[in-house]
Amino acid sequence: MNEDGLREQLTAYRDATGGLAPPATLVPDILAKVPRRARARRFVRDAQAAVVVAAVVGAGGGVWAAVETTRVQRQLGVQVSAWADGP
Amino acid sequence: MVDEAFADLVRRTSARFYQLALRMTGNPSEAEDIVQETYLRAHLALSEGEFEDRAALDTWLYRVALNASIDVLRRRKRWAFFRAVFRPENEAAERTEAHAVLRETAALLSLLPPEQVGALVLTQVEGLSNAEAARALGCSEGAVEQRLIRARAGLRRRGET
C-alpha cells in the first residue's frame, strides 16, 4: 500500500469510527458493575496484603512490616498483630 | 462522594475512550471490555484519592485505555493460530458500511506490532502530535517517529506481496 492509499484508508477509518457511538447500555452497565468489581478487587488485594503482613509480623519482620501493618489496619479496620498466630 | 465523581467521569469520558479502544482494536466487543477495565482502574484510583486534579486523571485514563488496547492486540497475536484454525465470525462486522471499513482497516493494522498500531492510530487517526503520542505511549518522540516509519514500511511491504 502506498502513502496516499494508507492516508485514504486511515481517513476513512477515522470517519467510520467517529460515527460509531458506544452502545446505549454501556454507561449504565459501567455504573452498575464497575463499582462492585472495584470494591471486590480492593478487598481481595487488601486481604492478600493482610495475610502477607501477618506472616511477616509473625516472623519478626521489622520496619517494613510495622509500616504495612499500620496501613492495612487502617484500611481493614482490624488488628493485624492479632493475626500473627494465624488469622 | 466517590460514586458521584465516578459517575460524572464516566458520562464525560466514556465515548472518547470507547472510540480510542475501537480505533486501536477495530472490534466493538473488545472496545467495550477495554472501557470497562479502564473504569475499574479509575474507580480504584478515585477511591484511594490518587487524583485531585481532573485533567491529570483524564490523561492517566487515556494512557490506561491505550495500554489496555495494546494488551488486547498482544493477546490476539498469541491466539492468532487458534483463530486461524477455528475462524470465529465477528457478529457485527458486515452490518454497515462503517463496520466494513472498520474490519478492513483492523485487518490491515493487525499486520503490525501493537506498538506501531498505537503510534499510527494516535497520530493519523486520533490526530495527536508526535509529542502528545509519545507522552500517551510512554516513550520518546523519536521512538514514535521510528514506529511510524516502520509501520508505513511494513504496510508498504505487505501491499507489494
Image (spheres, coloured by chain):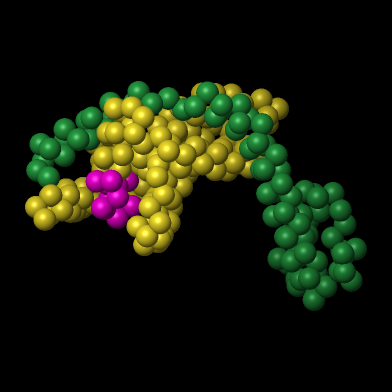
The answer to whether B140 is drawn above or below residue B91 in the figure is below
- Please provide percent x and percent y for residue B28: 43, 36
Relative depth, front residue between A40 and A66: A40
- Please provide percent x and percent y for residue B154: 17, 53
Residue A73 at least partly seen: yes
Q: Residue at x 32, y 46 (%)?
A: B118
Q: Residue at x 81, y 53 (%)?
A: A73
Chain painted in yellow in the figure: B
What colour do you see for chain A? green
Relative depth, front residue between A66 and B60: B60
Q: How many discs mark residues in the rendered view? A: 0
The residue segment tinted magenta is B107-118
* Residue B68 among magenta residues: no
Q: Residue at x 40, y 34 (%)?
A: B92
The answer to whether A67 is drawn above or below residue A58 in the figure is above
Q: What secondary structure is the magenta-colored segment mainly?
A: helix
- Please provide percent x and percent y for residue B27: 40, 40
Residue B145 at least partly seen: no
Q: Is residue B11 left or right of residue A82?
A: left
- Quarter of the picture holding the N terminus of chain B: top right
* Residue B115 among magenta residues: yes
- Please provide percent x and percent y for residue B66: 41, 43
